[in-house]
Image: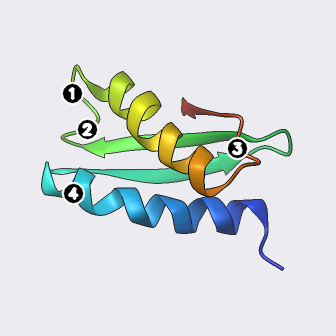
Amino acid sequence: METLKEKVQKALEKVRPSLQADGGDVQLVDVTEDGVVKVQLMGACGGCPMSQMTLKMGIEKILKHNVPEVKRVEQA
């Protein structure tokens, strides 16, 4: 059976191509037992003024949809 971290990693693979298309990327830092995912936005995403929206409306939404155990996503 997949661990929560493995499920999150798989879900991030679905987000990654659109971030990379804009010159950015996302790296999984940690997944806590209570469903908090910590990620690092990289490349163009790291300094983008829209990064918080990308994090919440994009990455968090997709992760919650694909991995119901995820409660929230935070910038590490």
As drawn, the label of residue 48 is: 1
Amino acid type at image mark 3: Val
Decide: is 19 above or below 4: above
Q: Where is residue 45 in the image (x, y as percent from the top left)?
A: 25, 38
Q: Is mark 4 on a helix, strand or loop?
A: helix
Q: Which of marks 1 and 4 is nearer the N terminus?
A: 4
Separation of marks 2 and 4 at Cα, in angstroms:
9 Å
Q: Which of 56 and 46 is in front in this view?
A: 56
As drawn, the label of residue 45 is: 2
Decide: is 56 above or below 8: above
The residue where tag 4 is placed is 20
Q: What number of labels is visible?
A: 4
Amino acid type at image mark 4: Gln
Residue occupying image coordinates x 22% and y 19%: 49
Q: Is mark 1 on a helix, strand or loop?
A: loop
* Quarter of the figure with the C terminus: top right
Separation of marks 1 and 4 at Cα, in angstroms:
13 Å
Amino acid type at image mark 2: Cys
Amino acid type at image mark 1: Cys
Q: What element carries label 2?
A: loop
The residue where tag 3 is placed is 70
Q: Which of marks 4 and 3 is nearer the N terminus?
A: 4
Q: Which of 40 and 17 is in front in this view?
A: 17
